[in-house]
């Protein structure tokens, strides 16, 4: 079923996925067999990782490298290979399985169908979360499917579906319009609105998809780990990355940062190198473009700064903490501007327009239009990016009568969101999925 | 089990169970409808080709995708689809939104589609070819520009939106005026007659109302009479008082309304105008195998299209069966023994349907679908040799085939 789901969108590249499953299945078996010989097992693991990264390189990075080589005056031909949807996700997922087998963290899976199901499981196949095999190893053959869990899965799916359709898609309309304007025609206020809208779009797009994946997983009896934890309430950049796309952060932590020594290294230079490697690769993972690399290196700079200075942990006064929190949000938002822009120049141009440096005015009719059309979605998005509803719910859960009333209100609200979201789909509304491209 | 037992059981149903049922209900409706449709779509290309090749498998996936999209859009289940659209429109209305699903609610409450800046040079060039062809044959030509929902002289667009329909139209008319092509600008005619866009247009559709279309028909006939192209005709033929106007109230949800729902901007009345006087005409639509002859109201109207229901029904094609590649009207009792050819878009539906009242033979072509007729335009034109060639379009069509079709591709124009 999962392969059919993938084949629906990518009838040719389903063979790439199937090939990846087969290759990693055989590699893990081989590593397990070679385990008594540590050197041979390690070589097999490295070869497998190289094979996975090689496939990823060919599909995702080959033309990028060629373009950069050609910038030095050569004229190497481009291959123009189409990018299979979700290749970064399923490649990393499969690699983590093989590395965990090598490390002895998980038992090798001898049933190819079970491994195939882990790699290709449709709820999280094309946009994560990156599920670790050890997190679902026991659930493959031993899980419970009951109405209660199914219902909770439905609730979670509707939450994600609504986040995506109601919030992300409407924020996308604002962001697309703002980013589509020439820098000189984008007023300062509108530039900030566009940047905020994109920040909200990418969060709800991605977290919405993750919620749908977690929800669908629950419907089938699987319990996936969370991928987002209200990242926009973070008090620091480091905390932001402990709350944003947690599965990716944990992957790089466990398979790149820790093997390099992590923070427990003797020299600052080594620490900087380790951080640089992780954040360079994180940026690169997001896309074959200097935009993404610079975005990743921006985080390298900020996180290194925090690690070396101890900020904001050193702040005692609330003013300092609050200021750093705002600084964090601003850095994240500026990072998204580069993420969204069509190139470095476009990103710089957009950033300049946020400060009136593009010859643009302070205000324009677009601001009026945006507030009039999207005020409810903006307010909803802002509230949903905080823990306000979660905290409200946990207060109510303690009280019997209030809880019953809250359940009824919740049910009505979810049904309302489901119907409203379906109505947008039926009307054929704008429905981009950002993280599919990775 | 007694009532108390049932209630006790019901109380145990948590909200998650209800949610699960609602979710499954949506999947069931879509899925049940999807399975046979998608399966058939997959089999069709393989069955027709009687082979499994890369091309037939690719075609099968493509057909499955289209079938799946149709199911998701509840095509064929208009009532369900309409309910969702109405709900969405209601929410938009409550939120005070003005732009929903490509439709903008103007300050007068009407729905319009915004147009970007267009280069109408190629359209003007094609009009020149048509005009010169008529001139060479010693025949008449008229370009008639229908108005747009967004008026030229009033600013009723909400802040933050831009529309270039009138700017494009002005540029186009300037181009053809420079080439000496005669035209009627109905935007100016409306202003001159003191008819506002509120009165002239449907609320939920980009077209003018049928009553306005009838007025435009009279206006065109009057133009021909004033310019000596036809002798004066009996005013009865163009006087609305000589016609029955039956108004079907709250009957019509236009194209914009179908995208936004009836709760966003409301619904429209729909008028059907038929002559009170005696008539006998024929209408032939070759691509539909239609040949009707008799009383005008029996011949020229597709009464089957005049259905209520808002979604999945299109009463606007009641007049003259809507947009067809070629339509041929004949009226041996018409006062003007002339052949008229109208190249038109949908704005002509309530206009050119009445031309047979005045002209003995009227043909209409819609170049957007003309290829279905199976004949090239030049042959069609030469065979018919119209005495009057009318082009009637609205500003949304300045880049479309009715104006940009390569009508006479071997004739070079010198202007």
Image (cartoon, helix red, strand yellow):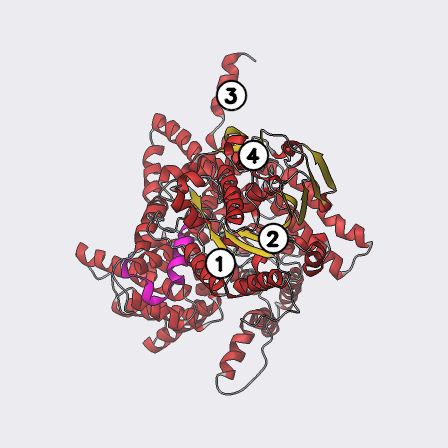
Q: Residue furthest top?
A: B2
Q: Mark 1 to mark 4: distance in Å?
A: 32 Å
Disc 3 and disc 2 on one polypeptide chain: yes
Q: Are marks 2 and 4 in contact (CB under 8 Å)?
A: no
The one nearer the camera, B262 or B327, is B327
Q: Mark 2 to mark 4: distance in Å?
A: 47 Å
Spot occupied by residue A392 in the image (x, y as percentages of width and height): 32, 38
The one nearer the camera, B25 or B72, is B72
Per the rendering, the mark at residue B388 is: 2
Per the rendering, the mark at residue B80 is: 4
Sooner in the amino-acid sequence: mark 2 or mark 4: 4
Q: Mark 4 to mark 3: distance in Å?
A: 32 Å
The reply to whether residue A415 is visible in this rendering is: no
Spot occupied by residue A405 in the image (x, y as percentages of width and height): 37, 27
Q: Residue at x 52, y 15 (%)?
A: B5
Disc 2 and disc 4 on one polypeptide chain: yes
Q: What is the crowding at mark 4: few (fewer than 14 residues within 10 Å), some, or many (at least 20)?
A: some
Per the rendering, the mark at residue A435 is: 1
SS at mark 4 in the image: helix
Q: Are marks 2 and 1 in contact (CB under 8 Å)?
A: no
Q: Nearer the viewer, mark 2 or mark 1?
A: 2
The residue tagged 3 is B9
Q: Chain of mark 3?
A: B
The one nearer the camera, B374 or A80, is B374
Q: Chain of mark 4?
A: B
């Amino acid at each position: 079923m999962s392969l059919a789901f993938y084949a629906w969108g990518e009838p040719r590249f389903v063979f790439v996925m199937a090939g990846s499953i087969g290759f990693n299945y055989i590699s893990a078996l081989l590593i397990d067999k070679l385990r008594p010989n540590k050197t041979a097992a390690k070589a097999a693991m490295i070869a497998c990782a190289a094979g996975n990264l090689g496939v990823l390189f060919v599909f995702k990075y080959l033309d990028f490298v060629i373009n950069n080589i050609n910038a030095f005056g050569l004229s190497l031909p481009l291959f123009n290979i189409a990018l299979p949807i979700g290749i970064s996700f399923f490649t990393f997922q499969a690699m983590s399985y093989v590395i965990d087998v090598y490390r002895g963290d998980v038992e090798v899976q001898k049933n190819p169908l079970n491994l195939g199901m882990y790699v290709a499981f449709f709820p999280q196949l094309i946009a994560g979360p990156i599920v670790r095999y050890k997190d679902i190893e026991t659930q493959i053959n031993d899980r419970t499917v009951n109405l209660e869990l199914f219902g909770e899965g439905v609730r979670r799916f509707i939450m994600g579906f609504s986040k995506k359709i109601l919030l992300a898609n409407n924020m996308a309309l604002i962001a697309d319009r703002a980013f589509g304007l020439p820098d000189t025609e984008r007023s300062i206020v509108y530039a900030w609105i566009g940047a905020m809208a994109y920040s909200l779009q990418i969060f709800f797009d991605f977290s919405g998809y993750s919620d749908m994946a977690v929800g669908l997983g629950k419907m089938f009896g699987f319990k996936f780990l969370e991928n987002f934890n209200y990242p926009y309430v973070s008090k620091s950049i480091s905390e932001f990355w402990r709350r944003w796309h947690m599965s990716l952060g944990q992957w790089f932590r466990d398979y790149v940062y820790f093997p390099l020594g992590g923070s427990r290294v003797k020299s600052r230079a080594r620490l900087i190198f380790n951080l640089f490697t992780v954040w360079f690769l994180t940026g690169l993972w997001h896309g074959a473009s200097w935009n993404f690399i610079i975005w990743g290196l921006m985080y390298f700079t900020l996180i290194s700064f925090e690690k070396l200075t101890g900020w904001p942990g050193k702040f005692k006064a609330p003013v300092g903490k609050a200021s750093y929190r705002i600084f964090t949000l601003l850095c994240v938002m500026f990072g998204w501007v580069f993420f969204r822009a069509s190139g470095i120049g476009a990103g710089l141009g957009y950033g300049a327009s946020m400060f009136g440096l593009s010859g643009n005015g302070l205000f324009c009719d677009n601001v009026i239009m945006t507030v009039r059309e999207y005020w409810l979605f903006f307010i909803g998005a802002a509230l949903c990016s905080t823990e306000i509803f979660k905290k409200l719910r946990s207060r109510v859960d303690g009280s019997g009568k209030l809880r019953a009333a809250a359940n009824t209100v919740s049910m009505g609200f979810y049904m309302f969101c489901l119907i409203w979201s379906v109505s947008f789909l039926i009307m054929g509304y704008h429905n981009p999925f950002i993280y599919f491209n990775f | 089990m007694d009532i108390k037992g049932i209630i006790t059981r019901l109380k145990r149903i948590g909200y998650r169970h209800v949610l699960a049922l609602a979710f499954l209900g949506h999947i069931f409706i879509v899925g049940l409808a999807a399975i046979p449709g998608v399966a058939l779509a997959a089999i069709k290309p393989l069955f027709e080709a009687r082979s499994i090749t890369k091309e037939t498998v690719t075609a099968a996936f493509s057909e499955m995708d289209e079938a799946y999209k149709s199911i998701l859009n509840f095509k064929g289940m208009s009532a369900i689809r309409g309910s969702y659209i109405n709900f969405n429109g209601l929410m938009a209305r409550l939120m005070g939104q003005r732009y929903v699903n490509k439709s903008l609610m103007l300050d007068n409450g009407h729905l319009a589609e915004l147009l970007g800046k267009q280069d109408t040079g190629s359209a003007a060039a094609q009009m020149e070819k048509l005009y010169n062809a008529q001139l060479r044959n010693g025949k008449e030509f008229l370009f008639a520009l229908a108005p747009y929902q967004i008026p030229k002289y009033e600013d009723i667009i909400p802040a933050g939106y831009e529309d270039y329909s009138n700017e494009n139209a002005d540029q186009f008319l300037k181009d053809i005026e420079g080439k000496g092509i005669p035209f009627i600008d109905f935007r100016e005619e409306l202003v001159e007659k003191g008819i506002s866009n509120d009165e002239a247009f449907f609320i939920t559709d980009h077209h003018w109302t049928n009553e306005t279309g009838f007025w435009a028909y009279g206006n065109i006939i009057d133009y021909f009479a004033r310019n000596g192209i036809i002798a004066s005709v009996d005013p009865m033929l163009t006087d609305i008082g000589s016609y029955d106007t039956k108004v079907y109230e709250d009957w019509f949800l236009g194209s914009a309304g179908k995208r936004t729902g009836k709760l966003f901007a409301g619904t429209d009345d729909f008028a059907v105008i038929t002559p009170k006087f005696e008539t006998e005409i024929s209408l032939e639509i070759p691509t539909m195998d239609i040949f009707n002859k008799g009383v005008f109201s029996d011949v020229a109207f597709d009464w089957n299209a005049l259905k209520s229901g808002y979604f999945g029904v299109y009463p606007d094609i009641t007049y003259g069966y809507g947009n067809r590649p070629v339509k041929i009207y004949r009226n041996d009792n018409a006062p003007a023994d002339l052949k008229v050819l109208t190249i038109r878009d949908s704005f002509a539906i309530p206009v050119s349907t009445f031309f047979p009242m005045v002209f003995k033979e009227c043909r209409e072509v819609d170049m957007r679908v003309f290829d279905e007729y199976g004949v090239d335009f030049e042959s069609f034109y030469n065979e018919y040799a119209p005495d009057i060639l009318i082009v009637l379009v609205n500003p949304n069509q300045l880049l479309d085939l009715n104006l940009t079709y390569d009508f006479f591709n071997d004739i070079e124009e010198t202007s």
